[in-house]
Amino acid sequence: NGALNKHHKDDLSDQIKAATKENHFRAENTQLMLSYQKGQITLQQYKVLLFSLYEIYKALEEELDRNSSHPAVAPIYFPQELARLESLESDLEYFFGQDWEKRVIVPAATQRYKQRLRKIGQENPELLVAHAYTRYLGDLSGGQVLGKITQKSLGLSSKEGLSFFSFPGVSSPNRFKQLYRSRMNSVELTEEEKAAVLEEAVEAFELNIQVREQDSGLEVSDRPVRVFDDLQKMLSIATETHQSRSDVGAARFTASPVLQFAVGLCVALATVGAAMYGM
């Protein structure tokens, strides 16, 4: 199908790839991504990450559902093939039991990410295209590999608890990605709207990665704390519970290799498929 294979430099998908190229490069060359390859995640860390992903996808998918007939959203609306919310609910129930919702942890940066998705869903639904593309195509590209690594590092005997990584509705990820890009490129946007979508794609990526390699306790006044900065603080507390209360404050600002890896998993969940976008 010629429509699926056409590639023009003015295609929205190609423009997003170009606009976020630096973000991809930075994410793929951090110590955190290198740590991921070693498969060092712990069960506690994975559980915390699932909570954050659940909150992000709940906001994204509810806004996509609500705007499913919007002319910019309708062409890239594939709930049967891509939706992650039920998978995440299944994984959370596996690890926490039926009352898992009472135990949801929402880091402040995740809360801000949710608020951004809610805001654009209400005010500028066309910008949801950037978030859907960034998350779903990354997850689709890296899901199979990430699932295997996570299963092995956690010592899980089955795929239970790993539903997030599986896309049973997609028989060929590569063919589906071609279809998705083709549909996205068919969205009619003004030049101003297209520029806004490109800007939002960069922001979507930044919301999904830790953009600065420094102690998470150092606040940079001109930049918001991102999801993975926040999670690193939480995970440092979760892994230092044996310390006294007076020591926990100090533990917030440690960045041991294991904690760096946990943040690396977050980065991987959002970006490990980035290099495969061109496939």
Image (cartoon, rainbow, N blue to C red):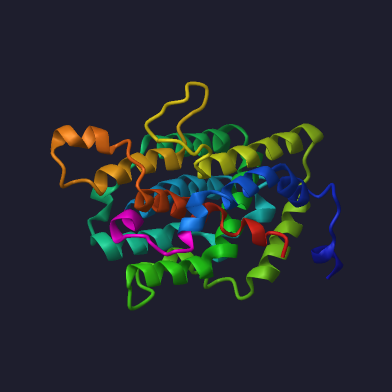
- The picture places residue 126, in percent across and down from the top left corner, at 66, 40
Instruction: Residue 107: name its quadrant.
Output: top left
Task: Determine whether 153 is above or below 36 in the image.
Answer: below
Going by the image, does 175 lie left or right of 148?
Answer: right
Closer to the camera, 129 or 274?
274
Tell me where residue 38 sits by quadrant. bottom left
Q: Residue at x 59, y 71 (%)?
A: 170
Instruction: Specify start and end residues of the magenta stretch as a single range.
Output: 36-47
| The one of 235 and 124 positioned closer to us in this rendering | 235
Horizontal arrangement in the rendering, residue 121 relative to residue 106 (left or right): right
Q: Which residue is pictured at 64% across the width and 42% down the height?
A: 201
Q: Is residue 105 visible?
A: no
Image quadrant holding the C terminus, namely: bottom right
Q: Is residue 57 visible?
A: yes
Residue 191 at what x, y percent from top left?
81, 35
Q: Residue furthest left?
A: 244
Residue at the spot x=38%, y=51% of the render?
257
Question: Looking at the image, which residue is at 44% across and 57% down?
Answer: 85
- Considering only vertical position in the picture, is 115 above or below 4? above
Q: Which of 144/64 is in front?
A: 144
Q: Percent from the top left, x then y, of residue 5?
A: 82, 65
Q: Give coordinates of residue 25: x percent, y percent.
A: 64, 48
Q: In the figure, is residue 83 to the left or right of 129?
A: left
